[in-house]
Image (spheres, coloured by chain):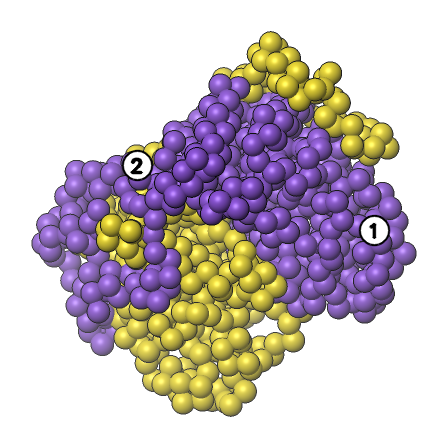
Amino acid sequence: MKTIFEKSVPGREGCWPCDGIGEEAYIPRELLRDGEAGLPSSGELDVVRHFTKLSQRNFGVDGNFYPLGSCTMKYNPKFTELVAGMPGFTRLHPVMPQLQGAGRFCQGALEVMYDTEQLLCELTGMHAYTMHPMAGAHGELTGVMLMAAYHKDKGNKKSKIIVPDSAHGTNPASAAVAGYEVVSIESRDGIVDPEALREVLDDEVAGVMMTCPNTLGLFETHLPEIVSMLREVDALLYYDGANLNAIMGQMKVGDAGFDIVHLNLHKTLGTPHGGGGPGSGPVGVSKRVEPYLPISRVEKMEDGQFALSYDHPKSIGYVAPFYGNFGVYLKAYAYMLRLGRTGLSRASEHAVLAANYMRKRLEKHFEIPFNRTCMHEFVASAVRQAEKGVRALDIAKALLDKGHHAPTVYFPLIVKECMMVEPTETESKATLDRFVDDLIAIAEQADADPESLHQCPTTLPVTRLDETFAARAMQLTQDMVED
Amino acid sequence: MPYVPHTPDEVREMLDVIGAGSIEELFAEIPEDLRPKSFDLPEGLSEMDVLMRLEAMAARNATDKASFLGAGFYDHYIPATVDALTMRGEFYTAYTPYQPEASQGTLQAIFEYQTAVSRLMGMECSNASVYDGGTALYEALMMAVRKTKRRKVVVSEALNPIYRVMLDSYTSNLNLEFVSVPHKDGMTDIEGIKAAIDKETAAVMVQNPNFFGSVNDFTELFKTAAEQKAVSIISSYPVLQTLLKTPGEMGADIAVAEGQSLGMPLSFGGPYLGIMTCTKKMVRQMPGRIVGRTKDTEDRTGYVLTLQAREQHIRRQKATSNICSNQSLCALRALAHICSLGEQGLRRAARLSIERAHQLADRLTAIEGVEMLTKGAFGNEFAVTLPVPAFDLIGNMLEKGFVPGFPLGRYYEGLENGLLLACTEKTTEEQIGVFVEMMKGALK
């Protein structure tokens, strides 16, 4: 499909013609650009057609089952868009509450912030939250910065952060970006092994980053032991909230001894993923880490009014220009109000039910490396199929042909040919069955005619794409293509 | 329960397949002492009740005031097509395009976005976006530090202070040395910055127009930086970039911007859009997602995420950044906004904003005691010195239904009487007239 630049006709006017006020009247010529930028010029209907056609070349939750492990692609309730689109929120300038006497003109927005923090505290058993981080990885970085501030303040000399080998790549990257050395430890039976931890645990360890349930969908059963080991060396336990959708109402991570947690509201609380952002990655902390939270903080005054406060001398400072992705956590807030206590618990219960149901239905057809009760996702492996030359990648592409988005493939790194399936609680049993049946059919095809699977996908706008060529040719813009 | 479709019978069937007696059994691995002692969230509400409650909360934000508040975040007109197109579920409910064949829509849109912002900035390459203009500056700085292996950073004090405090926070554990070059009466002190650059300098960071609205040409400055092998980083304002000399023309290595003005509502601070562009020779240092064009097995054009060896999911602790995804939907909005207005429409928005700001400046400075603080050429934002502290005046004007601007004293010592005002194409001449009359009254 042609790009909008290829469709563009110079001189055609968009929805707003340019009249003749000259910028030279105000800004000297030598400060102006040489000629036009080369932005598209298309009629409004052509633009609408272009974007509509683009959208038709995309899978999304609204049209396809999207069991992408670790990403919690649950249904995104439509009413939350109405909330995020309310002019009382969209038209509010973020500097407003920072102006003298203007706090009373933003009480609604400040209350949303405050109330969301309160609900998240209760949901996770943490002492306080900051809503500022703008994505999960951004929350991780904020969390590691909090860790550093805590140790600095206590006079601890710390240089290392421990990360299990099953962790998302963002964990080691966040620790490294914040200036720490990363120590990776091997899992045993798919979970963190306290013995392996003990071998690398010393006074230099600032903290351990854990995902629970972990990326294999397994609960970390040694948690209490790990917590007490860390206490001995004054290291903090970090919770990566990627998989919180498994345990809402079942366990509060704060009670379990975690000091810092980041949540992914776009996963757990149903805000749309938007093709890869914007998300929201608020960070919760235990009482001992609270002094270091970013500023500003939102507070409820004695008279019931809400206000921003900046007077936190131990704060790590500013991780965002304002208060985080307000428009995103506004949707998460609406979602929490809608589901409430029972709805949120029920979401986790049914997410776990769906994952276990699929796991059981698939176990005869695929290798399930850790085949026991899983939480909200499970990992299957295509090692049997690989013996015939059919890899996880081929299976993923075959699923696309059947109208499903593929599971996450080749992650976590510790399982060969892995496929990580996360159905979420919002998919009907009929959908789960259709996916499982299709996957079983693919397994049978892999057995009977492995070669045929190397061609998939064949029903989409493009067949398999050459990633090696992409990296070598480096055509990152229309202009690089034309050069 | 909302959004959980399973009937009791289906639950039973599923449990039978699993071989479990109840859903509770599936959670047996969570030990009893880790069970929640309380779970005191309120019970759920109907969709209607949630909407009514939030309407009431939204009503407690006064968004009806005529506002001259900018400070890097502007209320530009957003064409109706932007919401209509980007809210399509196929875009909206997709995720990072890990399966390119099923994500050509998202991928091609990002490729087009990369093209549009590269052209706007006059740069060669762009990534798929980062969180906002401040994190874009931080990531740009880290690119420079990696590239040069140096630790000294020269920063203009006329760069948005909201971003400068972010840079301080992000780098507090990284052993970098910041040299802040003071502004000169609201001007970027180019000579002062030049003098601060030496063989230890990793990066030079400036903004155009600067925080006070003043428009510059940094060509000479960037030449000096290049001579010392320091990386030049510029933060700019995309709407005005349709008219102003580009970072590329000035010879910048990295150009970043807050993309909010390209189709994002103010929305109390987010979600916004971090635009990052750079030269071809810097691209392997770039963080985040990047889309490239390629071919499929039938030789048809298609798009994929590329140069992924830079990224955390491949390189883990050795990645260029910890960023996982981007602000994809915001980038899509920016593209839809740019395409809907077209080159001419975007230029018109920029021109009108500049024209209104100059009208406002002329009329305000006609009031006795109000002087221009911003010197030389300016765009759609400028600063004035008032005969009274800006903080007091703002409180007074808020009562009258106006948000007069940003008090410079919040970040700049000695500028307690300084007020920063912005206009966009939405500012009307009538608003300006009434506002100036009110200001006269307030300053009597």
Task: Read off the chain for label 2.
Answer: A
Where does the image place residue B349, in percent across and percent down from the top left? 24, 52
Can residue B188 be seen? no
Label 1: which secondary element: helix
- Amino acid on which disc 2 is placed: Thr
Residue at 45 percent across and 89 percent down: it is B228
Q: Is residue A388 above or below residue A149?
A: above
Mark 2 and mark 1: Cα distance apart in space: 48 Å
Question: Is A125 situated left or right of A23 in this image?
Answer: right
- Dot 2 and dot 1 residues touching (CB under 8 Å): no
- Pick the front one: A369 or A443: A443
Label 2: which secondary element: loop
Where does the image place residue B229, in percent across and percent down from the top left? 44, 86
Where does the image place residue A7, in percent across and percent down from the top left? 15, 50
Residue, far front: A448
Q: Is residue A342 above or below residue B269?
A: above
Chain A display color:
purple
Asked if both marks, 2 and 1, belong to the same chain, the answer given is yes
Residue at which label 2 appears: A459
Name the image quarter holding residue B380: bottom left
Name the image quarter holding residue A310: bottom right
Which mark is in front, 2 or 1? Answer: 2
Crowding near the residue tagged with mark 2, few <14, some 14–19, many ≥20 C-alpha atoms within 10 Å: few
Residue at 80 percent across and 40 percent down: it is A221
- Pick the front one: B258 or B318: B318
Chain B display color:
yellow
**Residue A194: image tag:** 1
- Amino acid on which disc 1 is placed: Pro
- Pick the front one: A27 or A253: A253
Q: State which quarter of the image contains the C terminus of chain A.
A: bottom left
Residue at 74 percent across and 57 percent down: it is A185
